[in-house]
Amino acid sequence: MYYIGIDLGGTNIAIGLVDDAGRILHSDSVPTVKERHWSEIIRDMADLSKKVVADAGHSLEEVAAVGIGCPGTIDKVSGVVVYSNNIVMDHVPMAEEFRKYIDLPVFLENDANAAALGEYAVYGEGADSFVFMTLGTGVGGGIILNGKVWSGFNGAGAEIGHQTLVFGGEPCTCGRKGCLEAYASVTALINQTKAAMEAHPESMMNEYAAKHGKVNGRTSFECARAGDPAAIAVRDRYIEYVAEGICSIVNILQPEILSIGGGISREGETLLVPIKEYFAHNDYNKHMAKTDIRIAKLFGDAGIVGAAKTAETGMAE
């Protein structure tokens, strides 16, 4: 059986045709252009879904259901995006609107929860408790307990990026100050890099950014590898922010596995080793079995696979 998995992001709409083993048969993406009216975005989602299925050599008659991972607070029962601030939506009937174009069952999930479900389904090893942390434009997260997404009694839970890291600190997109997202997202890393570049005009980060046409999440990591002191300071401080957030998550939940995804996770051991070292010294638990902290393996495919698994789970319930 096949499922359409849609990962709706602030930059791109990524869609794949996925089988029940979590394998993506074919995928494609288009720019979201998030400033548009939501109805135009949903139309593009449907159009690309049809194209992906056709390009995979299949037909919509072979598809059981559609899953959509969307940023924001989701009412999974009604298929409504109650609120999203990254892609501005307020009580948008996404499932109903999508079915105007493709008449299939549609199931919605928060995008980070969907990504967590995807990573868990393929690489979770059947753990009873699993946390997925995404470091991207924001800091997202998903919690899997006993094989199911946990999102609180009202669907708004597991927003791990909005734990307070610094009281009264940097402003966050949610309207609060000092959230982990304001320090540990790639957006925050870029801001930290820019500040260091301004303070240290001699830093090779300035040359690197000029060569690549912009400052991105790799700027400090690449220049740190080359030995640039300012870049090393940015990278190390950023990793500490991430690690401190992980300590708080683990202290509360003590999950079997915590998996780190998102674009910056491609740094692999460069990111993971210092996080584990920091965690070893700051984890509350000194005597019992420890959480297995690891780098996610699905990378950018987690959202698509998780959205498809959302559809599969929805059909089974």
Image (cartoon, rainbow, N blue to C red):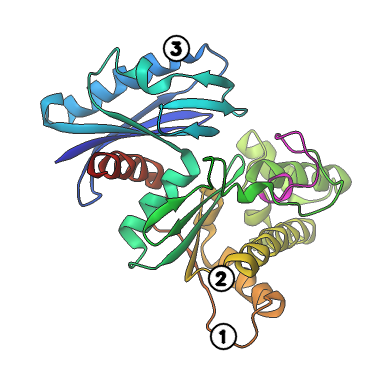
Residue 16 within the magenta-colored segment of the rendering: no
Q: Which residues are magenta?
A: 172-184
| Separation of residues labelled 1 and 3 (CA atoms) | 51 Å
Quarter of the figure with the N terminus: top left
Give how far apart the Cα atoms at labels 1 and 2 are: 10 Å
Residue 70: assigned label: none
* Number of residues whose C-alpha sits closer than 10 Å to that of mark 2, classed few (under 14), some (14–19) or many (20 or more): many
Of the image marks 1 and 2, the number of the one nearer the N terminus: 2
Q: Residue at x 46, y 25 (%)?
A: 80
Tell us which disc is closer to us: 1 or 3. 1
Residue 153 pos. (x, y %): 53, 45
Q: Amino acid at mark 2?
A: Gln
Residue 300 in sight from this viewpoint: no
Q: Residue furthest front?
A: 153
Residue occupied by mark 1: 288
List the residue tagged with mark 2: 254
Q: CA distance from mark 3 to mark 2?
A: 41 Å
Q: Is residue 295 above or below residue 204?
A: below
Q: Earlier in the sequence, mark 1 or mark 3?
A: 3
Residue 75, horizontal then vertical, whole percent: 47, 32
Vertical comparison of 245 with 26: above or below: below
